[in-house]
Amino acid sequence: PFDAGLYCLNPENGEVLWSYKTVAGLKNVPSIDGGVIFAQDTFGWVYALNTDTGALVWKSLAPVNWGHHAENGVLAAEGKVFCGAGRKVVTMSQKDGSILWIGERSISSEDCPSRFILAHDKEGRSILLACRQWWHIYALDAETGETLWRTSEPRYFTGTPLVIGEHIYLH
């Protein structure tokens, strides 16, 4: 009844269609892409499950800085899974969960990436926007993890960035 895990419910009656028990609790919103649901537990385990059956496709551990659990968002897009691992961003292959890059380490104890969104610049390059609760919004090259920019002054950001046209909005 109170097992940590991911559940799929029938929207008509709330019946559990399938469930998958995770190592630890999930405190973020999962992401779906290509018939696979991706979720991350607070210990850093990232799960890829078939959306129809709940069958495990793969499971991979993002290296978490202990003391900074993975309560971050997860974003699946363009063949990648972007997730938080304590105070850093980890990008995995959607195909097999292998780590593609690790980026943007922070120095503050509560400076964790909390929300992710994928945008594109004028040249069509994929940009991962990450909002750090308590401090900055920053942009990473989604292919390499290279930090492209970050806000210069700390602000208290708590929301998910919204990109419309050439502007980024957040609170």
Image (cartoon, rainbow, N blue to C red):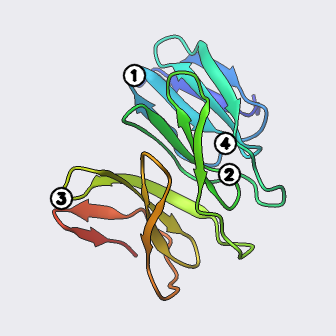
- The x, y position of residue 25, in whole percent, is 73, 41
What residue would you read off at disc 1? 12
Q: Calculate the distance from the C-alpha at mark 2 to the C-alpha at mark 4.
A: 13 Å
Picture quarter containing residue 166? Answer: bottom left
Q: Residue at x 26, y 62 (%)?
A: 163
Indicate the amino acid at tag 1.
Glu
Nearest to N terminus: mark 1 or mark 4:
1
Q: For the residue marked with disc 4, what is the amino acid?
A: Leu
> Which residue is denoted by mark 3 in the rendering?
122
Determine the CA span between mark 2 and mark 3: 30 Å
Q: Neighbour class for label 4 at 10 Å: few (<14), some, many (≥20)?
A: many
Q: Earlier in the sequence, mark 2 or mark 3?
A: 2
Q: Are marks 1 and 3 in contact (CB under 8 Å)?
A: no
162 relative to 35, above or below? below
* Residue drawn at x 67%, y 25% as measured from the top left: 59
Query: Earlier along the polypeptide chain: callout 1 or callout 3?
Result: 1
Q: Position of residue 48 (x, y in %)?
A: 57, 25
Q: Count how many numbered circles sit on residues in the image.
A: 4
Query: Contact (CB < 8 A) between labels 2 and 1?
Result: no
Q: Earlier in the sequence, mark 4 or mark 3?
A: 4
Quarter of the image where the C terminus is located:
bottom left
Q: Which mark is residue 26?
A: 4
Residue that numbered label 2 is attached to: 85
Residue nearest the viewer, comparing 148 with 106: 148
Amino acid found under the numbered disc labelled 3: Lys
Tell which tag, 1 or 4, sits nearer the viewer: 4
Dot 4 lies on which element?
A: loop
Residue at image position (65%, 64%) is: 105
In the picture as drawn, the residue positioned furthest to the right comes out as 67
